[in-house]
Image (spheres, grey):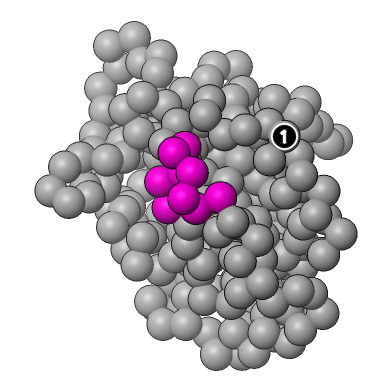
Amino acid sequence: MTAVLALDLDQTLIYSARSAEPLDGVDTIWVEDYLGEPLSLMTVRAHELLASLSERHDVVPVTTRTPEQFGRVRLPWRQPYAICANGGILLQQGIRDAAWDARVAADLTAVLPAGEVAGRVEEVAGQHWVRTVRQVEELFVYLVAQDRGAIPAAWLDGLTAWAGSQGWAVSVQGRKVYVVPLMLSKGAAAVRVAELLGGRLLAAGDSLLDRSLLEEASAAARPAHGELHALGYDRPGLFVSPTRGARAAEEILSYLGDRADFVTG
């Protein structure tokens, strides 16, 4: 019997050069390029731990990225399952699960359509601090700012209050502001994968959008940075990495690997 480890990617396993610090001379490996330039890295040790873990258990990447964005990441194992678009898309052998698509579409009929949410966010699209606004299918909307510090607090508070009244939630991750339906859940998708694989669910993540993932897991971990850390998020038995940045992935993978080995005997 194997465990199912549902692991968030950005800022949990993989990092930009800026967010990876402090590295203190630790060896790293680039795992993503974009437009011909290196974009995301892991420490060599975390990369090795992840490869080893995938040989013993079912490791499932979980991300808010679209399948196309996820496809740029070079992970050290083949992924029979992957969860994309914050749980809105379930990939099996790289192909979308049509039954999951139908379930998500049915759930989303209960909330304001993504197009109307995008219209609200696009009201600021012409302002100097906004780089772009994008809608991902009918699933969620996100804004990319020129700089995290340039996002007006009053606008963010207003958007958060309005979104909450419409059944949506706001998450800020670096320069990106995500607006996501409350029922669109990484946790629900991870539970479905664990049911299909027949294993006990363990998980790791760093953002507000990972909270459902951590709460569905029998063992959970988060790094000592990111949105959940800033909020002081905790739950019984939660492991928090002693360090922050890319080295936190080593500690998270080591902890969850030990837990997965233990619960599967």
- Quarter assignment of residue 87: bottom right
Which residue, as the protein is rendered here, is positioned at the far top?
A: 24
Q: How many marks?
A: 1
| Amino acid type assigned to the residue bearing label 1 in the image | Ala
Residue 175 placement (x, y as % from top left) = 49, 38
Instruction: Quarter of the image for the N terminus: give it.
Output: bottom right
In terms of depth relative to the viewer, which is nearer, 116 or 139?
A: 116
Give the residue drawn at x 31%, y 36%: 41
- Image position, residue 206 (x, y; %): 61, 38
Tell me the magenta residue range: 124-132
Looking at the picture, how far across and down is residue 201, in whole percent? Answer: 68, 57
- Quick check: 54 left or right of 64? left
Q: Nearer the viewer, residue 52 or 46?
A: 46
Q: Nearer the viewer, residue 126 or 69?
A: 126
* Residue 111 is a magenta residue: no
- Camera sees residue 201: no
111 to 211, vertically: above or below: below
Is 224 left, or right, of 72 in this rendering?
Answer: right
Which residue shows up at 82% across the image and 48% down it? 161
Q: Position of residue 56 (x, y in %)?
A: 47, 53
Please say whether residue 244 is visible from this viewpoint: yes
- Callout 1: 10 Å neighbours few (<14), some, many (20+)? few
Q: Residue at x 52, y 29 (%)?
A: 150
Hey, which quadrant is residue 196 in on the image? bottom right
Residue under circle 1? 154
